Amino acid sequence: MKFRLKRLSKKRPQRVQIKIQDGQFQIIGMGAWYSYLRDPYHLLLTIPWPGFLLLICLSYVAINLIFAVAYWLGGDCIANAQPGSFSDLFFFSVQTLASIGYGAMYPKTLYANTIVTIEAMVGLVGIAVMTGLAFARFSRPSARVIFSSVAVITPYNGVPTLMFRTANQRRNLILEAQMRVYLMRDEITTEGEFIRRLHDLRLLRNQTPSFTLSWLVLHPIDESSPLYGMSAESLIKTNTNIVVSISGIDETVAQVVHARHNYTARNILWNSRFVDIFHHTSDGHRYIDYKFFHDVVPLDETN
């Protein structure tokens, strides 16, 4: 199922293609990249570290190439640089941009001194920007929370219940952790209009004073549940997607951290249960074996 959203703009019309696959939105097409490039600060904060470092390196080389061309256009304006040597001009630009100043090469004309002045200002601003971006990326609080690869629907106290589990990988405390679960699906209104509707899923326990090890999240599918009366086939037909969001205060940095996960209709297993990860030792102690964290078994194998 595809949608086309057309955004009106006086400067440049933009068309973004949105595709829903397995209940999840996917932004495709060149319009998506155009949107990212219009907000480079957000792009530099969200791309992975390898991409961030690659962009910084490419930008650094590009700036030095531009100033090397500027020096080359000035003719013989750099003392002790080999005439016609573009590499000397490039490495002189590197020295100037980084405020190294070996002294072997130096500007000897007004034109060259003007370019050096401009490049020095660009270098100061560039260092400040790169330092700020790196600090912003390092200082962003993040949670290392894992979610089970699938969710299950199984009886719990005689009521069909949606279950999934999550665990804190950092082995510290996430204080006042809150869990929110939403259901998104395609619906047709009584007027015959198509909508993508969001429903809140009520949990048996949606918060905990300290999230340390694991958390089994339970949503009873009773008559008040949006999942009531639905089947595996109807979940796929309506592009149902379960959105999970957890937030809390990391005790180490005393800042709010977030984590989120999606379960598509194909990630929800019916009439199955999770393999128990709590075990007892011979001396009566309990321990958790995360090796089985994602494992499930059919109900007929548990009887």
Image: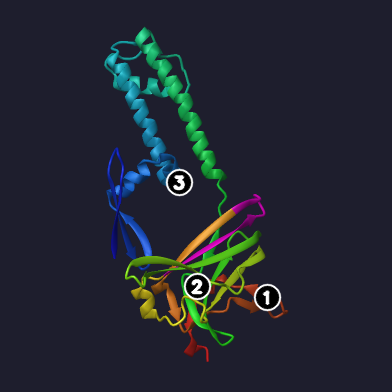
Q: Report the Cα–Cα distance between label 1 and label 3.
A: 39 Å
Mark found first going from the N terminus, 3 or 2: 3
Q: Quadrant of residue 275?
A: bottom right
Question: Tag 2: Cα neighbours inside 10 Å, few (<14), some, or many (≥20)?
Answer: some
> As rendered, which of 162 and 149 lies closer to the eye?
162
Q: Quadrant of residue 189?
A: bottom left
The kind of secondary structure element at disc 1 is strand
| Residue 207 in view, yes or no | yes
| Span highlighted in magenta in the image | 241-256
Question: Tag 3: Cα neighbours inside 10 Å, few (<14), some, or many (≥20)?
Answer: few
> As rendered, which of 63 and 207 lies closer to the eye?
207
Magenta stretch prevailing secondary structure: strand
Q: Report the Cα–Cα distance between label 1 and label 2.
A: 20 Å
Provide residue 93's location: percent of width, then percent of height: 39, 22
Q: Residue at x 28, y 48 (%)?
A: 30
Q: Residue at x 52, y 36 (%)?
A: 132
Look at label 1 and name its amino acid.
Answer: Arg
Q: Which residue is mark 3?
A: 49
Q: Which residue is mark 2?
A: 294
Q: Nearer the viewer, mark 1 or mark 3?
A: 3
Look at label 3 and name its amino acid.
Answer: Trp
**Residue 279 appears left or right of 31:** right
Q: Which residue is mark 1?
A: 286
Question: Tag 1: Cα neighbours inside 10 Å, few (<14), some, or many (≥20)?
Answer: few
Q: Is residue 280 magenta?
A: no
* Residue reaching furthest to the front: 191
The kind of secondary structure element at disc 2 is loop
The kind of secondary structure element at disc 3 is helix
Tag 1 near tag 2, CB within 8 Å: no
**Residue 165 appears left or right of 91:** right
> As rendered, which of 178 and 122 lies closer to the eye?
178
